[in-house]
């Protein structure tokens, strides 16, 4: 009888050991690390330069837990990263299965340059709570994630009534692997214009000094593209522009 009890005890201990090992493996799998990188791009804007003072990047994951990832701090001229140009600003290993929010933390050395004159950019909300982007992204173990943040300088710099400038950031995240883009050019070169691609939702960008434009982060579908130049020139519309996931549709030169 004692031998039977001894054998049963050994079996119970072995089963408990196997159960604890299984739980441990599940825990490791649930918290496995994922490489996460954040890059930044911009749409052209009618300024000489727009400088932002980037000091930190914070990721909010499961259950509201937050982590600061490695960031390349410094002052960035947003206009250096337009029309398809981007730069790596942060990267890190995440022990989470979802990303709920990305928060950019700015310092106080933000400014805009217009006609050779530099003006400080006030950023009270950014200094207090950061620039928050809702992401709601589910991560898969073993996949390297690259998120592109589109920082629209043209819409983000606001002229105040007293002649000062305020930074009210307009940002969105772009997942290039599940979206497409529209590229083109306007003539005559040097004309100020806004280009809008519409398919239920409108996406817009300014042309640069060379007349080029690029609208990124477009879901696949058919778009109406409208070029709205400064007066006295009239708008020009192109219909039935097809956007395919993972590709850039070049619509050539639009003559105004």
Image (cartoon, rainbow, N blue to C red):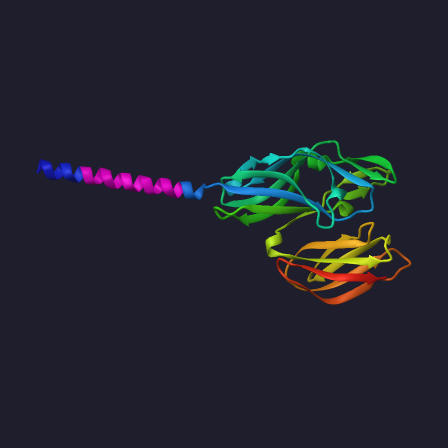
252 to 69, vertically: above or below: below
Residue 3, how many percent across, how many down? 10, 37
User: Is residue 252 rendered to the left or right of residue 29?
Assistant: right
User: Is residue 249 rendered to the left or right of residue 117?
Assistant: left
Query: Foreground: 228 or 159?
Result: 228
Query: Foreground: 135 or 144?
Result: 144
The residue under the point 86% across, 54% down is 189
Residue 117, how many percent across, how many down? 87, 36
Query: Foreground: 197 or 213?
Result: 213
Is 116 covered by the magenta stretch? no
User: Is residue 165 rendered to the left or right of residue 202?
Assistant: right
Is 11 covered by the magenta stretch? yes
Quadrant of the drawing holding the C terminus: bottom right
Query: Foreground: 106 or 205?
Result: 205
Q: Quadrant of residue 57?
A: top right
Quadrant of the drawing holding the N terminus: top left
Give the total number of marks visible in the rendering: 0
Residue 98, how many percent across, how many down? 52, 46
Q: Which residues are magenta?
A: 10-27
The residue lying furthest to the right in this view is: 232
Q: Main secondary structure of the magenta part?
A: helix
Q: Quadrant of residue 157?
A: top right
149 to 237, vertically: above or below: above
Residue 197, how many percent across, how many down? 73, 60
18 to 250, vertically: above or below: above
The residue lying furthest to the bottom in this view is: 240
The residue lying furthest to the left in this view is: 1
């Amino acid at each position: 009888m004692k031998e039977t009890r001894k054998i049963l005890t050994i079996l119970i201990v072995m089963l408990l050991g196997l159960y604890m090992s299984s739980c441990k493996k599940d825990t490791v799998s649930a918290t496995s690390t994922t490489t996460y990188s954040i890059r930044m791009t911009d749409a052209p804007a009618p300024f000489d330069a727009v400088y932002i003072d980037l000091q930190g990047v914070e990721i909010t994951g499961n259950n509201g837990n937050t982590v600061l990832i490695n960031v390349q701090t410094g002052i960035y001229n947003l206009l250096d990263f337009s029309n398809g140009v981007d730069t790596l600003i942060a990267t890190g290993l995440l022990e989470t299965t979802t990303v709920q929010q990305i928060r950019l933390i700015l310092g106080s050395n933000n400014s805009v340059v217009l006609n050779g004159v530099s003006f400080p950019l006030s950023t009270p909300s950014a200094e207090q709570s950061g620039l928050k982007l809702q992401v709601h992204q589910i991560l898969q173990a073993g996949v390297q994630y690259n998120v592109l943040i589109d920082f629209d300088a043209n819409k983000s710099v606001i002229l105040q009534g007293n002649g000062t400038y305020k930074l009210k950031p307009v940002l969105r995240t772009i997942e290039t692997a599940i979206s497409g883009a529209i590229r083109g050019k306007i003539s005559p070169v040097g004309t100020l214009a806004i280009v809008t691609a519409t398919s239920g939702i409108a996406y817009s960008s300014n042309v640069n000094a060379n007349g080029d434009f690029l609208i990124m982060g477009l879901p696949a579908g058919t778009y109406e593209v409208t070029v709205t130049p400064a007066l006295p020139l009239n708008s020009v519309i192109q219909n039935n522009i097809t956007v395919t996931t993972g590709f850039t549709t070049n619509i050539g030169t639009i003559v105004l």
